[in-house]
Amino acid sequence: MMYYNYSSSNQPGYSPYPVYGYSPLSQGYFANMAMDFRQQVIKGQATWTEGGQVTKCGIPWSRNQYLTVAVDESTSYQCGQSLKIRNPANAREVIVTVVDQVPGYPQNRVNLHRRAFQALGGNLNQGILNIEIMPSPELEEEKWGKYLLELVQTAYPGSRVTDYSSVGKNQMSPTRVRETFDFILSTQQEQIKIRGNVIYDPQTDRVISFDLAEI
């Protein structure tokens, strides 16, 4: 296993937390993309880390049940953005939240928290995992879908959210809007479909109520 230390500071080669299994990867590999259902798939690799106390995004590594990730500081991925990461070798997928930025990574390499790396079936001793990165533009555009996503992942800590979709939006009154999303969760034993509803005031963006139900 190789051990390198990178940083979220502007000083190259220094980092407050370790990166495991890092090895150089050609930037040209980033160009190898394909369409997968609704969005582009970026083929790349993932390393893993235990995280640190301070992040550039100000978001803790413990967010989202430790399904979190650091990306290169020059990528288009934003702090708090959701990424779907897939292991093509076993079809396992996780949705992770960007919580930190580090320098010196290729555009198609990410640094997953150890728990996310293991959830994908990654070998910690090997330290590197071939992955597919799916930015999640549909969910990022739907603020309330992401709100429900975090609730689902908190309510079902032993499962992985592998897909999601917007079901509909209903203007109930001038001060009440209901949005509905479906989420597909997978465990070792089963697949679960969850429907989430959130009712909010569009004038204040304040949540009035929400609910989750298995369907």
Image: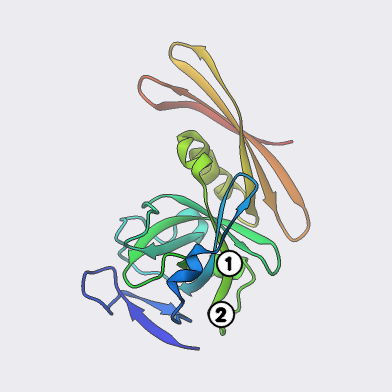
* Residue reaching furthest to the top: 173
Q: Would residue 206 be found to the left or right of residue 15 on screen?
A: right
Determine which residue is flagged by label 1: 131
Determine which residue is flagged by label 2: 124
Marks 2 & 1, CB-CB < 8 Å contact = no
Q: Residue at x 67, y 39 (%)?
A: 194
Q: As rendered, which of 160 and 85 lies closer to the eye?
A: 85
- Residue 92 is situated, as x and y percent measured from the top left of the image, at 67, 62
Looking at the rendered structure, the number of numbered marks drawn on it comes to: 2
- Residue 144 is situated, as x and y percent measured from the top left of the image, at 49, 34
Q: Earlier in the sequence, mark 2 or mark 1?
A: 2
Q: As rendered, which of 167 and 208 lies closer to the eye?
A: 167
Q: Residue at x 65, y 55 (%)?
A: 159
What secondary structure is marked by label 1?
strand
Q: What amino acid type is highlighted by mark number 1?
A: Ile
* Whether residue 167 is situated above or below residue 125 in the rendered picture: above
In three-dimensional space, the C-alpha distance between marks 2 and 1, rounded to whole angstroms, equals 15 Å
Q: Residue at x 21, y 69 (%)?
A: 10
Q: Residue at x 45, y 62 (%)?
A: 69
Q: As rendered, which of 53 and 13 lies closer to the eye?
A: 13
